[in-house]
Amino acid sequence: MSDNALILGAGSSHDANVPLLGGFVERMSEYAIRKKANDQPLKKADQDTFERAVRIRFELDRYNGRVMFDDRNIEDILTILSFNALGGRRSR
């Protein structure tokens, strides 16, 4: 057994075309619009998931006047959705 350990950072899968968190929302929106991931057509279930995610992102626009957040940042979006869930309101 070896005493070596590999430590991978957040960008380790970037070369495989996996978006970093900062570009995740833009890539998700692009997939929803084009109905393709890179050059591969999305399955119907995946199209529905991406379209639902984009709808939720647009529903968050009502928060922009009351709370400062980046609607292109997946961490900010998930934080607001978590607060919604804690408050008893779930997005569709």
Image (cartoon, grey):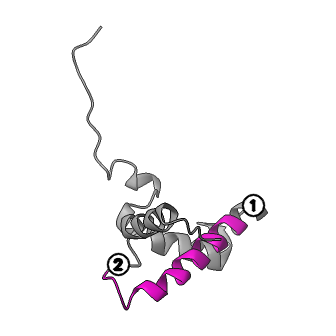
Q: Nearer the viewer, residue 92 or 32?
A: 92
- Look at the numbered disc 1 and give the secondary structure of its residue: helix
Residue lying furthest right: 44
Q: Residue at x 75, y 60 (%)?
A: 45
Image position of 51 (left or right of 18)? right
Query: In the image, what residue type sits under mark 2?
Result: Asp
Instruction: Give the Cα distance between marks 1 and 2.
Output: 27 Å
Instruction: Look at the numbered disc 2 and give the secondary structure of its residue.
Output: loop
- The residue sitting at the bottom extreme is 65
Task: Give the x, y percent position of residue 13.
Answer: 40, 49
Q: Quadrant of residue 24?
A: bottom left
User: Is 59 a magenta residue?
Assistant: yes
Q: Quadrant of the N terminus?
A: top left
Q: Would you say 79 lies left or right of 27 here?
A: left
State the residue position of label 1: 45
Q: Which residue is mark 2?
A: 70
Where residue 26 appears, as percent x and y from the top left, is: 47, 75
